[in-house]
Amino acid sequence: MDGKAGSPEYEGYAVFDPKAPAGRCTVERCKGPFKDCIVFMLGGGNYLEREQLMAWAARNTNASVAAGLGSTGTAGRNLLYGTTEVLSGEQFVAQLVELGKRSGVSAATPAGPTQ
């Protein structure tokens, strides 16, 4: 989100700025630090991933400000995390077992709580 020139993240993404005139978006004008970020995962997501993203945003911020509605509270940056599914731990493990079966990898049955 810092938009530092020379980094693979900076050089490797396309910018579509609705405020820029058509065909006039120069690299220097369109790339740079941003305050809004959307992370959307196709498939299952979970609370831990969301918390890790929020922690990352907090670590990669120069100054802290008060959080507004929907804000992470990190230097005015807004981070939105979405998924097509939110899975419980049991659902996630069941999906991993199914993927293991489909790929031909023998998957051990998840063990229940030890007694």
Image (cartoon, rainbow, N blue to C red):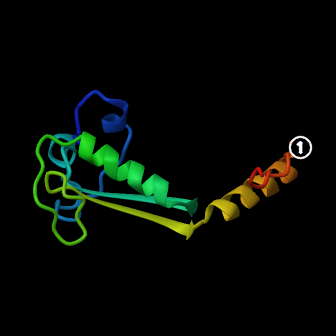
Disc 1: which residue: 106
The answer to which quarter of the image holds residue 87 is bottom right
Give percent across and percent down for residue 21: 17, 61
- Camera-nearest residue between 22 and 79: 79
Q: Residue at x 12, y 49 (%)?
A: 64
**How far from the left and from the top, in percent, is residue 34?**
20, 51
Q: Nearer the viewer, residue 79 or 12?
A: 79
Q: Residue at image x 85%, y 53%?
A: 102
Q: Residue at x 84, y 47 (%)?
A: 103
Q: Quadrant of the N terminus?
A: top left
107 vs 89: above or below: above
Badge 1: residue crowd in 10 Å (few <14, some 14–19, many ≥20): few
Picture quarter containing residue 59?
Answer: top left
Q: Residue furthest front?
A: 115
Q: Amino acid at mark 1?
A: Ser
Residue visible at 33% across and 44% down in the picture: 56
Q: Secondary structure at mark 1?
A: loop
Q: Position of residue 20 (x, y in %)?
A: 17, 59
Left or right of residue 63: residue 38: right
Q: Nearer the viewer, residue 85 or 115?
A: 115
